[in-house]
Amino acid sequence: MDLDKRPQTAPRPATAPAAGPAAGPGLRASDAERDHYAAILREALAEGRLTAEEHTERVEAVYSSRTQAQLEPLVADLPRPGAASVPPAAAGASGQAGPQESLFAVFSESVRRGHWRPAPRIRAIAVFGSVEIDLSEAVFEHRHLTIQAIAVFGSVEIRVPENVTLHGSGSGVLGQFEVDGLQATEPEAPSVQVDGFAVLGSVEAKPKRGRFIKELSRHLRKRLG
C-alpha cells in the first residue's frame, strides 16, 4: 500500500532575543565631552604632535560629531594628558552650575546684542566664521559670567560695559587671543571671565567705550540680590 509522502517541515530556528539598547547606533556626545576632546587636540598642537592644518580639521570634526563613537578616533593616535583626569561627564558636572548658551558659526555669522539676558555660561565657537557677543546693553541676572571662546580660522568678538570686571586667559596659535582686563570700582559688580584659544583666528574681549550698566547699585540689589 502506497503511503502519502509528505515533506517534513524543517524545524524553525530559535528566535534570537531582541537586541538591547547597546546595539543602537551609539550614545550621543555631550558638550562637555566635545570640549574634553578639543582640549586633547589643543595640547597635541602645543606639543607639536599635530600641524595647524591637522588640528583645524580635527577640531571641526569634534564639534560636528554627534556620538561618542565619532569622537574617539579623532584622538586615537594621541596621548591623553593627565591620565587621572576627571571623566568628561564628571568634568561637566563639576564646573560652574547654571544653564549654558551656545553660539556656533561655521562658515557663517552668529550675533547676540541689544537687550538680552545672557546665561551664566556661554560657549562661542567660530570655524571659518564670526561670533559677536555684545553685553553692553545686556541685563545681567548673574554676578559671574563665563565665556568659552574658540576661533579656528574665524573670529570671536566680545564687548562689555565699562563698569563690570573683565578678565580672562587663553592662547593663540598663529592667531590672536586678547582680553583687555577691566576692574570695576563697585566690588559687587558683575564679572566676565573669557577663556579659550584661537588657531589662525582671533578672540578679542574689551569694554565698549561709553556703555555702562545704568544705576548699577540699584541693578545689583534688584537683579543679583
Image: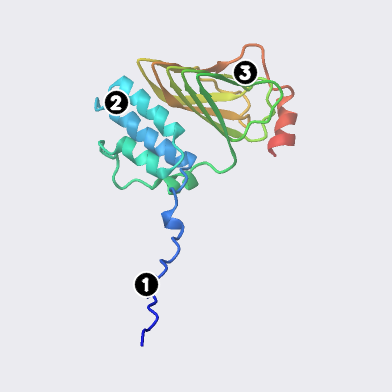
Q: Secondary structure at mark 1?
A: loop
Q: Residues within 10 Å of mark 1 (few under 14, many from 20)?
A: few
Which mark sits nearer the N-terminus, 2 or 1?
1
- Circle 1 is placed at which residue position? 10
Residue shown at 39% from the left, 33% from the top: 38
- Circle 3 is placed at which residue position? 162
Mark 3 or 2: the one toward you: 2
Query: In the picture shown, does residue 23 fall above or below 7?
Result: above
Mark 3 or 1: the one toward you: 1
Residue shown at 36% from the left, 84% from the top: 2
In-front residue for pair 116/110: 110
Residue type for callout 2: Ala
Quote the CA–CA distance across marks 3 and 2: 34 Å
Q: Residues within 10 Å of mark 3 (few under 14, many from 20)?
A: some
Quote the CA–CA distance across marks 3 and 1: 84 Å
Residue shown at 30% from the left, 26% from the top: 45
Q: Could you tell me residue 105's position as x and y percent? A: 53, 23
Residue type for callout 3: Glu
- Circle 2 is placed at which residue position? 46
In-front residue for pair 160/111: 111
Residue type for callout 1: Ala
Which mark sits nearer the N-terminus, 3 or 2?
2
Query: In the picture shown, does residue 61 fall above or below 72?
Result: above
